[in-house]
Image (cartoon, grey):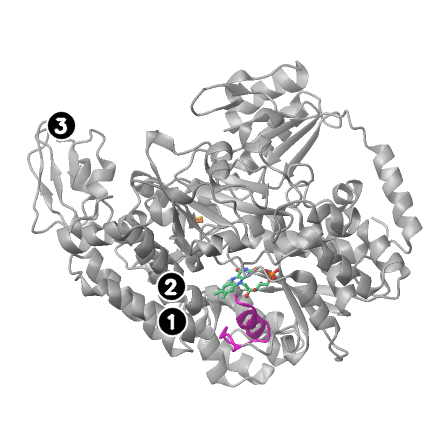
């Protein structure tokens, strides 16, 4: 890779790069995204490498490991181009057949094609799969095309093209103007208008300013930002260069949580490549503008996703939030004006510049423009990453793209916004998803986690889970959050242990009111959402726990009883071996019995029994 | 204290107070915990009071003040994994390793931790041993996974 000294140099390199590439060359793209990687992407890629070597296909067929292909539920995914054949659940053992049939023979391996859950219809091409058909990809569009470790791949698709306009045709004010007109709002949760934030920062007089990319992605159940950082790292860097130029920053930070080692690796490499190519550093493309980026790693604290806590963490302190104002745009990192935006926000910026703000503003709803990436998980057929225009309904996302709920079970709720969000019941399935509509039903857009729950989820348990999570993660600085969460946690423990009382419900509402109005940061202010939304829409479940001492979904352990059905039990003793307290006894090859006094209701016996002999009530 | 080993880490930084967290992260990754003598030296070199170092080391979950086991077992208790049986994995691991969450087994082989979300929610429940992910883990797979690491 040369160091680009000028625009002409870059354009000429891009032209030659494209001329060298044959669009008809067969390509094998093995997904190594967050979903496929644990299923063995590396082993599948290695098998392809070995097979292609053996069949003399090296040089003829291009093999790439790419970012997330989206449909994680059916990993490991392999995409064959140019035919766009989408194979699913590929194991190393399937590879010889794919090579033989598809790469050599030009045919299709039927059994590895996508199958729709209800109709069992097979789909050969990616574009035929309903999961993909309903999507519109702006942020994710390069993920199943490029090798994230190749700057050439990124450049071939027009990467860093926006810098021409930005540096040579637009003033910083015009860049901010464009972002404002696009209607882009922050994808990290709050939905603050991005252009307005940049304007506030630009208007400060300070000479030293910073830009930060928030890649902390702390919401459990969300992996959009991870997929973008791992799958298209240069898009984030390109966005940050534009933002830095707009506000006049010379230094940027990308803050990544340490649970994402691959994201750190890919970003580190991308930054190094961008430096070598001259997109970062001094006098970028002879524009006279200097800018560089460094990575700062999180150390395992959810609250560090909050912008002021994140800044404290980069400065070397514990991640305690500060009351705002002053906002970071006025006084942020080391007391200097700082723009902090989410990964997905940054990744949207280059296309807004390339395609123009009007193009972007034409997508989405009145108040929410563009697309949103969601991680769709939980009780759903097609869990994975989806990107849809703002305003798509929950029903479309859950049923049309997600393929609905497995096992013929009923939809109960969808949880959005992570621990700061709420649970949305079936009656709102036709809600168009955007910042404002979700708020109206007591949840938030959040960073984009969508967790689907069916009748086997207990909503009291879900709320208890989030409160437990937030209790652990509260930094403890302000009293309403620290003590409020402690009391809520205690009440939830009482309710789920059969010690709940009627007055607990009003007490919880009172606590929530105090926390929402008096906590310093968003963690405490929005911690009430999981509680209030479940209290509102699933009050009957709370009442069942309190009045009948029953958990209707059979989740809350202390309210359950486990017994063994003597008819079904074969006496294989699998449960006896698993029981941590030795509560199960009996003669081998005969029916076993559970001692109710000793049983701690952990459910391990229920899970290991191969004969459905353990009953849970 | 192995002065050369620590020097190898410190020499890559400017020696300013804001280098504290990255330096501690490297020590944690390198030593498996934050040894006392090393921490004192870091305080001196970065001109940061020991109290601040201990407040940082106890605030963030990735730091440990005691040595960890040879293998780090992390069970995801993110929302999806919670719903799909993560807590039962924790129970099973606790009883098999004879430890509670946050501790190391007597033979020094395994440390057990729970984490917020590993970002592989589509394969819930997920656990990690060292750098390797295990997808869709059921209780009966636990002994097989542990066996791979028992020496
Ligand atoms: C408790 C808490 C956790 C947060 N975690 C994240 C996070 O993981 N990622 C993120 O981008 N924003 C997170 N935010 C929002 C940030 O404070 C900030 O608003 C955001 O990074 C701004 O970027 P945006 O305008 O592009 O969304 C969190 C906020 C709170 C209160
Ligand atoms: S909830 Fe376990 S990987 Fe996300």
Mark 3 or 2 closer to N-term? 2
Local secondary structure at mark 1: helix
User: Which residue is depicted at the point 80% across and 65% down?
Assistant: A173
Q: Which mark is residue A515?
A: 1
Q: In this picture, which residue range is highlighted in magenta?
A: A306-323
Which residue is identified by label 2?
A528
Please say if A190 is above or below B56. above
Q: Nearer the viewer, residue B74 or A18?
A: A18
Output the chain of dot 2.
A
In the rendered view, would you say A373 is above or below A505?
above
> Share a chain, discs 1 and 2?
yes
Residue annotated with mark 3: A568
| In this picture, residue A303 sits left or right of residue B69 | right
In contact (CB < 8 Å): disc 1 and disc 2:
yes
Percent across and percent down for residue A108 are: 60, 16
Residue A471 position, x and y percent, is 36, 66
Image disc number at residue A380: none
Residue A525 visible within the image: yes
Earlier residue among tags 1 and 2 = 1
Can I make out residue A252 in this image? no
- The chain carrying label 1 is A
The stretch drawn in magenta includes residue A240: no
| Residue at mark 1 shares a chain with residue at mark 3 | yes
Query: Secondary structure beneath disc 2?
Result: helix
Q: CA distance from mark 3 to mark 2?
A: 45 Å
């Amino acid at each position: 890779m040369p160091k680009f000294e000028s625009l002409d140099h870059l354009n000429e390199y891009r032209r030659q790069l494209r001329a060298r590439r044959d669009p008809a060359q067969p390509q094998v793209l093995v997904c190594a995204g967050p979903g496929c990687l644990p299923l063995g992407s590396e082993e599948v890629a290695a098998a392809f490498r070995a097979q292609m070597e053996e069949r003399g296909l090296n040089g003829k067929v291009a093999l790439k490991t790419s970012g997330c292909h989206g449909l994680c539920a059916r990993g490991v995914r392999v995409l064959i181009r140019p035919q766009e054949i989408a194979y699913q659940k590929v194991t190393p053992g399937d590879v010889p057949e794919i090579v033989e049939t598809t790469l050599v023979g030009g045919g299709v391996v039927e059994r590895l094609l996508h199958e729709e859950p209800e109709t069992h219809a097979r789909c050969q091409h990616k574009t035929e799969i309903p999961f993909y058909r309903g999507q519109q990809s702006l942020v994710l569009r390069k993920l199943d095309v490029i090798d994230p470790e190749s700057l050439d791949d990124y450049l071939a698709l027009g990467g860093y093209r926006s810098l021409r306009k930005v540096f040579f045709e637009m003033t910083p004010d015009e860049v901010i103007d464009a972002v404002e007109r696009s209607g882009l709002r922050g994808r990290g949760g709050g939905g603050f208008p991005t252009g307005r934030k940049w304007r506030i920062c630009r208007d400060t007089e300070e000479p030293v300013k910073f830009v930060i990319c928030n890649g902390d992605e702390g919401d459990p159940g969300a992996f959009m930002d991870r997929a973008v950082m791992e799958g298209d790292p240069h898009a984030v860097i390109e966005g940050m260069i534009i933002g830095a130029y707009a506000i006049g920053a010379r230094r940027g930070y990308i803050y990544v949580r340490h649970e994402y080692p691959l994201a750190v690796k890919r970003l580190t490499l991308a930054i190094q490549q961008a430096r070598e190519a001259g997109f970062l550093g001094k006098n970028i493309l002879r524009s006279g503008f200097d800018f560089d980026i460094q990575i700062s790693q999180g150390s395992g604290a959810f609250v560090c996703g909050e912008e002021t806590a994140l800044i404290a963490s980069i400065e070397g302190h514990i991640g305690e939030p500060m009351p705002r104002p002053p906002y970071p745009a006025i006084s942020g990192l080391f007391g200097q004006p700082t723009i902090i935006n989410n990964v997905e926000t940054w990744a949207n910026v280059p296309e807004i510049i390339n395609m123009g703000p009007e193009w972007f503003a034409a997508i989405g709803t009145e108040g929410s423009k563009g697309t949103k990436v969601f991680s769709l998980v939980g009780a759903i057929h097609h869990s994975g990453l989806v990107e849809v225009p703002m305003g798509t309904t929950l029903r479309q996302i859950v049923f049309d793209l997600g393929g609905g709920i497995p096992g013929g079970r009923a939809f109960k709720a969808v949880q959005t916004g992570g621990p700061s969000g709420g649970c949305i019941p079936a009656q709102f399935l036709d809600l168009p998803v955007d910042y404002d509509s979700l708020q109206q039903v007591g949840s938030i857009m959040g960073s984009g986690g969508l967790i689907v729950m069916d009748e086997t989820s207990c909503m009291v348990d879900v709320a208890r889970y989030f409160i437990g999570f937030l209790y652990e993660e509260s930094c403890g600085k302000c009293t309403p959050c620290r003590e409020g969460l402690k009391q809520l946690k205690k009440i939830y423990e009482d309710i789920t242990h059969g010690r709940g009382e009627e007055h607990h419900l009003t007490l919880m509402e009172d606590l929530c009111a105090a926390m929402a109005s008096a906590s310093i940061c968003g963690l405490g202010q929005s911690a009430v959402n999981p509680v209030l939304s479940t209290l509102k829409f699933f009050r009957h479940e709370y009442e069942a726990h309190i009045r009948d001492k029953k958990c209707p979904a059979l989740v809350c352990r202390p309210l359950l009883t486990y017994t063994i059905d003597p008819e079904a039990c074969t006496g294989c003793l699998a449960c006896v071996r698993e029981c941590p307290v030795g509560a199960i006894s009996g003669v081998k090859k005969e029916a076993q019995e559970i001692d109710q006094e000793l049983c701690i209701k952990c459910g391990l016996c229920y899970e290991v029994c191969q004969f459905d002999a353990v009953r849970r009530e | 204290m192995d002065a050369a080993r620590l020097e190898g880490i410190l020499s890559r930084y400017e020696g300013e107070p804001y280098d504290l967290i990255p330096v501690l992260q490297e020590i944690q990754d390198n030593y498996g915990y934050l040894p006392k003598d090393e921490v004192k030296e870091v305080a001196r070199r970065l001109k940061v009071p020991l109290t601040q170092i201990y407040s940082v080391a106890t605030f963030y979950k990735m730091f440990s003040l005691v040595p960890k086991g040879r293998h780090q077992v992390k069970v995801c208790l993110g929302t999806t994994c919670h719903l799909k049986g993560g807590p039962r994995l924790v129970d099973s691991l606790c009883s098999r390793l004879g430890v509670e969450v946050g501790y190391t087994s007597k033979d020094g082989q395994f440390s057990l931790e729970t984490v917020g979300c590993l970002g592989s929610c589509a394969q819930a429940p997920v656990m990690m041993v060292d750098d390797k992910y295990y997808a869709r883990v059921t209780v009966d797979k636990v002994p097989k996974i542990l066996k791979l690491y028992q020496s």
